[in-house]
């Protein structure tokens, strides 16, 4: 019987999958905390105990020799049914013996800063060590909660778009050319041709709009070969993308973004409050502030705010990570929000397919969306005129070979369109206020990490 419905004295039956963490003795009883009673019990605290008045010396010796994190098969009875459930062991068998852990789970539940200040052995438990032993790290409640949030983010993204009647597409990852820029792409030999791993679904989500579909979305792995060893770049991440025909203005894309992400944040706060509290316990964070409708500021307004605060941003160039963060602080103070859009970016800072602003071609019909002062989404209107697209690709030094069909498809009638792309791990990292994107990925890939 599952101990949720159990009464004292019920037989425990056989519970495969129990994990030993700690033991202590009180009187004649030896106790273990177990953290994985069974799937439906997960998150419920439980203890096992062996009473040496009722079991043989041999069995007690066998039980106390089982190492922490081993998996055991236990039969016995429910002694105390309320949480923490107490289970009295009649017999126990070790199913899989764990090696001595490189560090205790109780230490894995502490932040690296805390560990740095303590014992010399524990000071070696850095993020790097934790990523090397990812499977151990992921036995802690905070990491489990991060993965629960990650699963919810992709589900809520999909749910919000499906509820609008937008169709999900599966798009190729093996493609002929670099979608986002020439340098940062993984190339490989594909049956005698050179191929690339898609840096985003950009080309094909746009081509999908040259059919009868007017709004589409897709989720899936994307690959970036930049040697970006930063807290927020991965070499492989999960892209959350949508693309739509627009009637008048790329604000229509931002309206969909608003619906998807505000409803996502509301739902995460409502339905994942427990997980967010668990994460914040180990990795403290300021509560996220956001408005019912996303604040929209022009890039120029943003630069002006930075200048007024004494910074010197490039007015028509790239906004550095440091200045993005500074702007985040200024916006939070002035508008009480950590979630905002900067629109009308300088054209020079955007990919070749971006539509220039018709009134001032130094700018473009594009935007980035920020959460806690860092970019989580990029998007905008695309060029749908094939000649102009070719001209912009050439001007940006993008090789045309892999882009021929992409550009060609706009010759057969293409609607004005726009869209956006978010990075799942970035959204999770910044929503939860994590200091490093690797904590938001089950098995992160960066320029120095291809394993585990
Ligand atoms: P994204 O690729 O999401 O836009 P980003 O905002 O950091 O991430 P861009 O502003 O588009 O990147 O910058 C262009 C490229 O430079 C990115 O593909 C990114 O991988 C890389 N890059 C950006 N910031 C850094 C950084 N601080 N260190 C190393 N590489 C960076
Ligand atoms: P961009 O290159 O800005 O735009 O990427 C879109 C979003 O993907 C995430 N992201 C990353 N996450 C982890 N590691 C990386 N190296 C990384 N690079 C990007 C960020 C970013 O906002 N095709 C356009 C989108 C569009 O216009 O529709 C694109 O890929 O969250």
Image: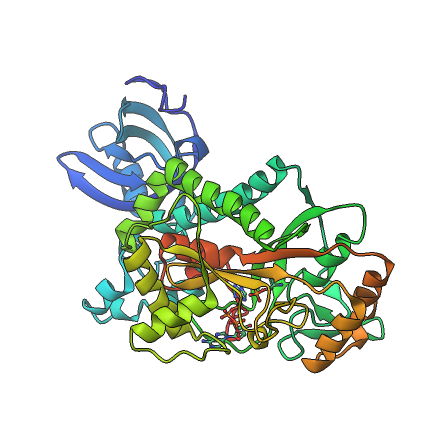
Q: Relative to the observer, which residue lies in front, 322 or 110? A: 322
Q: Residue at x 45, y 69 (%)?
A: 300
Q: Residue at x 30, y 44 (%)?
A: 277
**Residue 377 visible in this rendered orientation of the protein:** yes
Q: Position of residue 307 (x, y in %)?
A: 34, 75
**Residue 441 visible in this rendered orientation of the protein:** no
Quarter of the image where the N terminus is located? top left
Find the residue positioned furthest to the front.
359
Q: Position of residue 67 (x, y in %)?
A: 33, 50
Q: Is residue 124 above or below residue 43?
A: below
**Number of marks present in the image shown:** 0
Q: Relative to the observer, which residue lies in front, 341 or 57? A: 341
Q: Position of residue 394 (x, y in %)?
A: 73, 80
Q: Relative to the observer, which residue lies in front, 432 or 363? A: 363
Q: Quadrant of ligand 2?
A: bottom right
Q: Residue at x 69, y 46 (%)?
A: 215
Q: Quadrant of residue 37?
A: top left
- The scheme the figure's colours follow is rainbow
Q: Is residue 189 above or below residue 271?
A: below
Q: Quadrant of residue 132?
A: bottom left
Q: Position of residue 171 (x, y in %)?
A: 72, 55
Say whether residue 101 is left or right of residue 421. Answer: left
């Amino acid at each position: 019987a599952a101990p949720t419905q159990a009464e004292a004295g019920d037989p425990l039956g056989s519970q495969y999958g129990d994990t030993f963490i700690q033991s202590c003795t009180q009187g004649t009883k030896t106790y273990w905390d177990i953290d994985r009673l069974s799937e439906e019990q997960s998150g419920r605290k439980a203890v096992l105990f062996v009473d040496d008045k009722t079991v043989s010396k041999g069995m007690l010796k066998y039980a106390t020799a089982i190492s922490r994190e081993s998996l055991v098969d236990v039969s016995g009875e429910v002694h105390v049914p309320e949480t923490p459930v107490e289970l009295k062991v009649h017999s126990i068998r070790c199913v899989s013996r764990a090696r001595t852990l490189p560090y205790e789970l109780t230490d894995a539940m502490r932040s690296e800063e805390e560990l740095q200040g303590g014992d010399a052995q524990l000071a070696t438990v850095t993020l790097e060590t934790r990523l090397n032993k990812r499977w151990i790290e992921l036995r802690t409640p905070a990491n489990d909660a991060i993965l629960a949030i990650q699963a919810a983010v992709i589900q809520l993204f999909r749910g919000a778009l499906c509820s609008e009647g937008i169709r999900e597409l599966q798009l190729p990852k093996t493609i002929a050319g670099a979608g986002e820029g020439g340098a940062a792409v993984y190339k490989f030999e594909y049956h005698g041709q050179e191929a690339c791993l898609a840096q985003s679904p950009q080309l094909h989500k746009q081509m999908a709009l040259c059919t009868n579909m007017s709004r589409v979305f897709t989720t899936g792995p994307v690959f970036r070969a930049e040697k970006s060893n930063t807290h927020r770049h991965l070499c492989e991440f999960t892209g959350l993308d949508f693309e739509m025909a627009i009637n008048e203005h790329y604000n229509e894309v931002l309206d969909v973004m608003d619906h998807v992400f505000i409803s996502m944040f509301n739902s995460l706060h409502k339905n994942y409050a427990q997980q967010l509290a668990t994460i914040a316990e180990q990795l403290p964070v300021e509560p996220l502030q956001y408005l019912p409708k996303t604040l929209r500021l022009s890039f120029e307004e943003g630069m002006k705010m930075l200048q007024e605060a004494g910074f010197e941003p490039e007015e028509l160039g790239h906004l550095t990570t440091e200045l993005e963060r500074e702007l985040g602080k200024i916006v939070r103070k002035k508008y009480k929000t950590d979630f905002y859009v900067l629109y009308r970016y300088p054209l020079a800072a955007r990919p070749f397919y971006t539509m220039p602003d018709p009134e001032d071609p130094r700018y473009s019909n594009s935007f980035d969306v920020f959460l806690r002062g860092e970019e989580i989404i990029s998007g905008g209107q695309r060029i749908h005129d094939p000649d102009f697209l070719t001209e912009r690709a050439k001007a940006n030094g993008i090789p045309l070979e892999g882009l021929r069909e992409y550009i060609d498809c706009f010759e057969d009638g293409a609607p004005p369109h726009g869209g956006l792309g978010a990075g799942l791990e970035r959204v999770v990292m910044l929503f939860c206020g994590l200091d490093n994107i690797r904590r938001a990925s089950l098995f992160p890939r960066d320029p120095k990490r291809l394993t585990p």
